[in-house]
Amino acid sequence: MSRLQRVRQNLRKAYETGRESVRAARTEQNEDTDVDRNDQFLIPAPVVQVDQQSTTSRDDIEVPHSLRIAAAWSWRLIVVGVIGWALLRFIGIISIVVIPLAIALLLSALLAPAVGWLLRMRLPRSLATFLVLICGIAAVAGTLTLVINQFVDGLPELTSRASDGIRQIQDWARTGPLHLSDKQVDQAINSAQNWINSNTSSLTETGFATAATLFELVTGMLLVLFATFFFLRDGRKIWYFIVRLFPVNARWSLSDAGDASWVTLGAYVRATVLVAFIDAVGIGIALLILHVPFPFPLAALVFLGAFIPIVGATTSGAVAVLVALVSRGWVIALILLGAVILVQQLEGHVLQPLIMGRAVAIHPLVVIIGIASGVVLAGIIGALVAVPLIAVLNTGVRRLARGRPEGPLEAVPDDPVPATP
């Protein structure tokens, strides 16, 4: 046999040996598949997938996907929280400027329709804004003057009736269900007097601190007036200037969200004024019928308190009931309490859904949480600004999430056109 034939024979043997091994392996695999056909669905073979987009190194593959997602959310939330905390601290430092600007925005949203009406009467923008602002200042000054005059005139009578009310309370403590002795009543009165005497220094210091902040109060009032005037006159130009600071692709969406938020703010302020006026009229009529002292000042207090939803009207109504208790007795106080509860129920079940619900759709739980947070962060001003701020953010975020619509666009922030508020 030649050498070439030997090579061919060896290659054939190797080929046949390989085919036999492949056939044997296939037969063994088929037998295992027939025996354990159900077990292959119970214990699947582990498959390792490498996500090159969500991992930066091969070590991240060993970390579960859910844990990586939770860590990514966590550090982003931490960054947002730190930025929010720093922003709140910065606002607290410059609160003497931020608070007047917030009040000026609310006043501008309230007075903007009057300015628009005068502009439609062909008046110049500056003149229309000046006339509306002067009329608003005159209305506020006249109301405060009337309230202060009535309070000063009725203060002596209220003081004498308060003394009678205190004596009635002492008699009730002795003869009522408490059955306190004269010694116990005197001890309670002495304790109250000692508390007042011990806190006289702190009260005096508070008075001096209030006198020291009088300059800041005057400065804030002037800033409110100037800011309201320029917001009413040049509000659209100021807004377009702010919009132009952002990237071009975000300008239209931001401008649309700002316009919708301004409409929501105006609707909220006007609806709040209407609800507050109805509350003040209802409780004021009850005060007049029951001959409670200071009906107009108490009605004005109810009107101002109604600007803080849910909490303000209830607190001012409690003050009116307390004045009725001191001046007219517990029977008149109970009747007035029933009238206040009736007005509050009318507001909560009729006025709020009918008027406020159409202007701003916010759940009552969100309102309560916002007011509580505002009180903690900024006191009374925080409670006043919390709900309109939530309403504006709600509308703005909804508009931004809606996205940019199809078709041609009308307003371009690069070329601002003065428009009526």
Image (cartoon, rainbow, N blue to C red):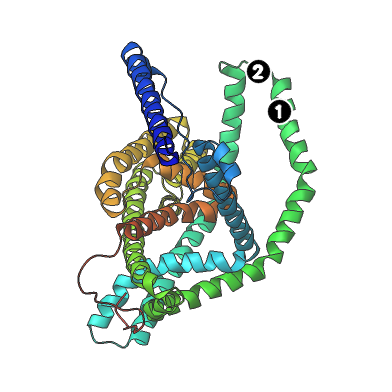
At 29% from the left edge and 40% from the top edge, which residue is drawn?
A: 346
- Tell me: residue 418, above or below residue 286: below
Q: Amino acid at mark 2?
A: Leu
- Foreground of the two, 400 or 140: 400
Q: Position of residue 301 (x, y in %)?
A: 45, 52
Q: Residue at x 77, y 47 (%)?
A: 200
Number of marks in picture? 2
Pick whichever, 276 or 91, lies toward us: 91
At 36% from the left and 61% from the top, the residue drawn is: 265
Local packing at callout 1 (Cα closer than 10 Å; few below 14, some 14-19, many 20+) is: few
Give the quarter of the figure containing the C terminus: bottom left
Residue 349 location (% of width, % of height) = 28, 39
Label 2 close to label 1 by CB (< 8 Å) = yes
Q: Marks 2/1: CA distance? A: 10 Å
Earlier in the chain: of badge 2 and badge 1, it is 2
Residue 119 appears at what percent x and percent y?
A: 27, 82
Residue 257 screen position, x and y as percent: 35, 64
Q: Is residue 213 visible?
A: yes
Whether residue 125 is situated above or below residue 40 in the rendered picture: below
Residue 409: assigned label = none
| Left or right side of 74 for 45 | left
> From the viewer's perspective, is 142 left or right of 94?
left
Q: Secondary structure at mark 2?
A: loop
The residue under label 1 is: 188
As drawn, the residue found furthest toward the left would be 407
* Relative depth, front residue between 47 and 193: 47
227 in relation to 59, above or below:
below
Amino acid type, callout 1? Ala
